Image: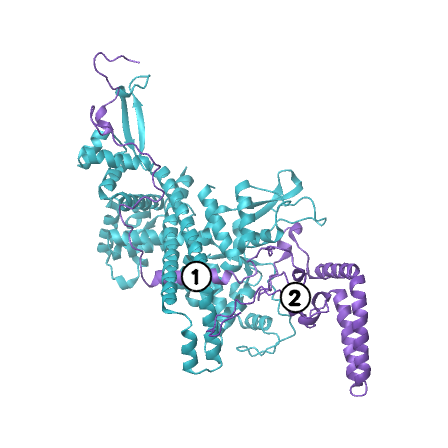
Chain colours: A purple, B cyan
Amino acid sequence: MSLGRGRTQFTFNVDSLGFGRGEALPASALVPSPLFPPLQFRPVPLPTGEEVDYMLALKQELRASSKILPSHIRPGRVKIDVDRYSDKYQSGEPKHSAVEWNPDWSRLPRELCIMGPKTRKASECITAITLLHHRHFLTFAIEMAFFHCWFQQTLEKNEKNQSEGEEDEEKKKTGEEEEESGEGEDYDEEEFEEETDYIMSYFDNGEDFGGDSDDNMDEATY
Amino acid sequence: MTAQEVRLCALLLQEHFGEVVEKVGTHLLRSGALNLRALVKKSLCVLVQHGMCTFGPGRRGPAGPLEYRVSCERILYMLRYPRYIYTAKSLYGDTGELVMEEILQRGQMTMSNTVRTVADRLTQNMEDGQSTDYNDVVTAFSRLVETHFLQRFSEVPESPVGGKGGVQMKMVTWVQELQRKPNWSTQRWESRAVHTHLCECIYPQHQPLRCNSTPPALSPQACGDEGIYWQVNVERFHLHFRHQAIISAVASKLDQTSSEIVRTMLRMSEVTTPANAAYTQAVSANEIFRAVPPSYNISRPILDQYLTLLVDDPMEFVGKAGDSGGGMYVVNLHRALANLARATLESVVQERFGSRSARIFRLLLRKRHLEQKQVEDFAMIPAKEAKDMLYTLLSENLVQLQEIPKTPDHAPSRTFYLYTVNQLPTARLLLQNCYKAVGNLIDRRLFETKENKRHLEKSQRIEAILGSLQASGAEPAQLAEVEEMITAPERQQLEALRHHINKLDSSENQVDETIFLLESYIKSTSCSR
């Protein structure tokens, strides 16, 4: 804009730049400034004392106990790689926390109300019946065979323990009926969960094997 | 809500309530108010239960779907829970501490539920054969309510029978409603009849331990106070913390006796001063003289001298409001907060940039606007270094540059450039930095835990094995063998990890104290406008 006659003129007080005219320019930066520049002054050490220690302990306790409370909601289990047949029979629900969570539904809007205990049973009932339908053909033969074998056994044992056999029969019948009505939480989980005929460890797909052996193992594993 | 606040909220939610709630909460925070379509219902319930989310009629009016609003502040208060619990402990003992802990963890609870849980916990910690008197717990609870540390959870808007559709808001006078206790006034808790009734509520089948009446056939739930939920009144705690800050500032600036006088003044005017007032109600010197604790043995003329000293102090904690009654004195709350915030800012600059930069900063705070030459002269620092420091502070945005043009074309040679520091925007900037700092601390702690997850799990398993062995009465040789399963370097690593996590947690608590101070200051300036 303004042509300097003979010498360049700056429009501002050049001293404030920090270097005089004619001197070497400061070195130009070739890289962005570091993400964690070295600290010029070390920070003051944390306060210590009984109060501080107590609050620290409180904080850690609060954190630990809030993980157990029912208000800590864990996400559903994510499928890792391939779908496995055993997934259907392994429980996907995390264990119930020790304390049941029953908020006061009258204080929350109605639309937030997820199924109460009664409707849950109804929906379980529905799913159980549909399961039954779908697998009806597959399991029918197996069940018939199973029932037949069992019946033979009870006939053999009939003289020894007649009443016991009847009780077993009733239990088995009610066991299957309970499954159908969706209330069966009393029976042996190992055997009867999800209407399979196999014990639950049958579906153990071996993913947990080898993880528990941290003991001193002198012999080599093959 | 700024980005740093949202990030910190997300981390806190994730820690206490799990990932699902964290995602829901963050989503709501980022997008304001939303209706129900995209959200997981249960996480909303959790947030509403804890008072962090409110719902009400939406934008389309009462006929439209409900809208949910998450309060960022309320989530950030989760950082302060240990401080609330510690205060309750120092004021009301272990019982008060447990009551506060229960209610903080659950969000809201009925009185009978709380009393029951706390008594159970106390009994667990006692030796066998002893039991907790419910009276103690009830007394602690009612004292917390009377001093307003606990309050009623506010009424919910009614939802119509149809389920869908609108919501009617009940207009209630919040303050009275919040303090109203159920039909059982707390005085009745002490009477014998009510005491037995409470015992019967909690122990219908078992033998009541301290009551002599026979338990009638009452169900455990029907205690007469369903629907009456109590929550923690955080505002009252904040008031308490503010007073504590002022008292300790006076103690460190002057001496213990003056801090006692200020404490007395604050205590006397606690109930009469409205919240967020700029200064307390005036109290006369005569009243102060009567109310000061006798252990300090202050005579009347000495009290007058102390009061004059407090009034003349440049910090202006105490002001004189009149001459009746031996002199009317007030505590200047907002001014005290501003001074505390200023001291915080100065100490931050000092610790980060050195004492000479702090000198420049203090100079600019006092003198408001200064040219570069004047800064160098007043601060008595050589020009080159002063320039350097000023530019560093400028690049960190702690100092601002103000142009005052002499000519309309803003020519640089004919413009004044003045350096200035504005306390309020700088405080806001530092507050955001604090949020970022706590976010970083939590991140680092999670990272450390994840890195050493294997070690931690192994040590937990070994502890469990040790515990079960000890319970079943094993020999010391077996115990030693199990203990040896953790090698020495692993033990060292675990020790170091524990040390790091403790340090990070402690730092969070410490930063939260600064956050509280800066927040109070910023809130006080917005109130006085």
Q: Earlier in the sequence, mark 1 or mark 2?
A: 1
Which of the pair B223/B266 is nearer the observer?
B223
Q: Amino acid at mark 1?
A: Gln
Q: Quarter of the image for the C terminus of chain B: give it.
A: top left
**Dot 2 corresponds to which residue?**
A203
Q: Can the viewer see residue B285 in this picture? A: no
From the image, tell me which residue sits under label 1.
A60
Residue B331 relative to residue B122: left or right:
left
Amino acid under label 2? Phe
Q: Residue at x 55, y 77 (%)?
A: B211
For label 2, count other residues whose C-alpha is less than 10 Å away and answer few (under 14), some (14-19) or many (20+). Answer: some
Residue in the picture at 42% in, 56% down = B448
Q: Secondary structure at mark 1?
A: helix
Q: Is residue B207 above or below residue B238?
A: below
B162 in relation to A220, above or below = above
Rendered image quadrant of residue A194:
bottom right
- Front position in the image: B459 or A177: B459
